[in-house]
Structure formats: C-alpha cells, structure tokens
Amino acid sequence: MEYGQFCPIAKATEILGEKWTLLIIRELLMGGSRFNELQRGLSLISPTILSRRLDSLAEHGLVVKKKIPGQKGFEYFPTGSCQELLPIVRSLGDWGMRWARSNLSEKDYDVELLMLYLKRSIVPEKLIGRETVIRFKFTDIEQFPDWWLVASGEEVDICVKDPGKDVDVYFTSTVRTMADIWMGDNSYKKAIADGSLKIVGDKALTRNISSWMQNSIFAGLPPANEI
C-alpha cells in the first residue's frame, strides 16, 4: 500500500495502516512474543495474515524474529523503533476510550482476550503464598465457560481445563461484566451489589482485588460525552 506522498504521516501509514498491524504491535508491546500467544490476543486473525504481518514488520525493522532455542517455532521481539510506538498506541487507546466506546457490541466481548488481559494484570508480589489459583465461571458462554489463572512465583498461566489445584478465589459473572470492571466502566462493589458478579474467597484476597489484579491502563477515562 503506497500513497505516493512524501508526508511522514503517509509514509508511516504505509507500514502501520494495514488491518491488524497496530493490534499486533499492541500485543508485542504488552509482552506477547510467541506466535500462539499473539494469535490468542487477536482471536479473529488467520495464521496466514499474522505470519505475513509479522514478516512485514520484521522487513521494516520493527520486529526481530528469533528461533526458540531447542524448540520448533520462533519468537518475535519489538525493536527500538517499535518501542517508540508505545506512547502513540497509548494515545490511540485514550482516544478510543473517549470517543469509540459507543461502537462496542456484544460480539466484541471476547473471553480469550479478556483472560489474556487479566493474566497480564496479575501482580504476583501482591498475592499471598507460593501459589494462587483463581477460577472464573462465565455464565453467558457455553463453550469454555470455566477458566483458571494459576500464579506461581512470577509466572502466571491460563488454563481452560481444571488444573486440579485448590482454588483461592472464585469469580462468577458474564464476560461483559468482568470486562467492564477491568476497563473501569463498572466496579467490583457495584457488580456485586446488583448481583452480576459473585466472588468467593479469603477476605485477604477479595477485599482489595485491584491491588493484585490491576485494571486496564485506560480505566478511569470517561467517554467524551461525560466530560
């Protein structure tokens, strides 16, 4: 895609303007490095398109592709030029929170993306003990309604099958309720009060959930019509 203009915005858009490219960069800047992890954060992307976009980003010097030692497959790491896009991506998210929230529909509430974001939001040092197991039951989906986050040391894993461990905190809600809380459009207190969320667990963990499972960096930004 070429615009035939010397304008730096046009030249930047030639690299970044294709569908999925900015979201791939979002995932890379949030710590995703392996192909299947990037795909999890972009559930509707085809493997072929993801591979093409990653190759294009590597060709333009935004990504370094490295073989995984002792394994099949590759890892993808953002370069310095890609890292410079972080404040731009953050500003784009700020704009979206103010001006694009009215475009949200039910199909946008993707449980896989939500769980990936909740995993990344865990603050292990704020948890208690060597291992913490958090179970989520989503009442509005039939396929894979049960999910687990297992935090052990600095590592946090997502499970869609019962890991067979004692659960420390249980969450029961719809995907939208949990996503709205994480995005700052709702709160744990309000959701519990109206019955859309149930939380069971030790009070040491349940009384201040946001301390160990932080909300989105965009939480707290009101829509433009509320400013």
Image (cartoon, rainbow, N blue to C red):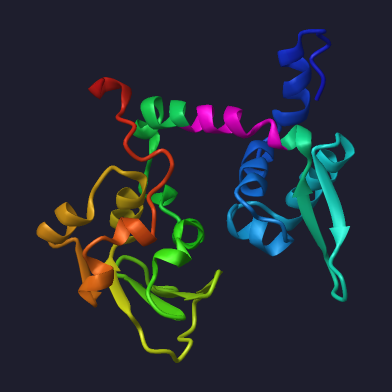
Q: Is residue 92 magenta?
A: yes
Predominant SS of the magenta segment: helix
Q: Residue at x 45, y 25 (%)?
A: 95
Whole-percent x, y for residue 200 in the image: 22, 76
Nearest to the observer: residue 204 or residue 59: 204
Q: Residue at x 65, y 51 (%)?
A: 45
Q: Is residue 168 magenta?
A: no
Q: Residue at x 46, y 81 (%)?
A: 130
Q: Which residues are magenta?
A: 83-93
Tell me: residue 164, above or below residue 205. Answer: below
The count of marks equals 0
Q: Quadrant of the C terminus?
A: top left
Residue 11 lies in quadrant: top right
Q: Residue at x 86, y 34 (%)?
A: 60
Whole-percent x, y for residue 5 in the image: 81, 8
The residue at the far bottom in this view is 164
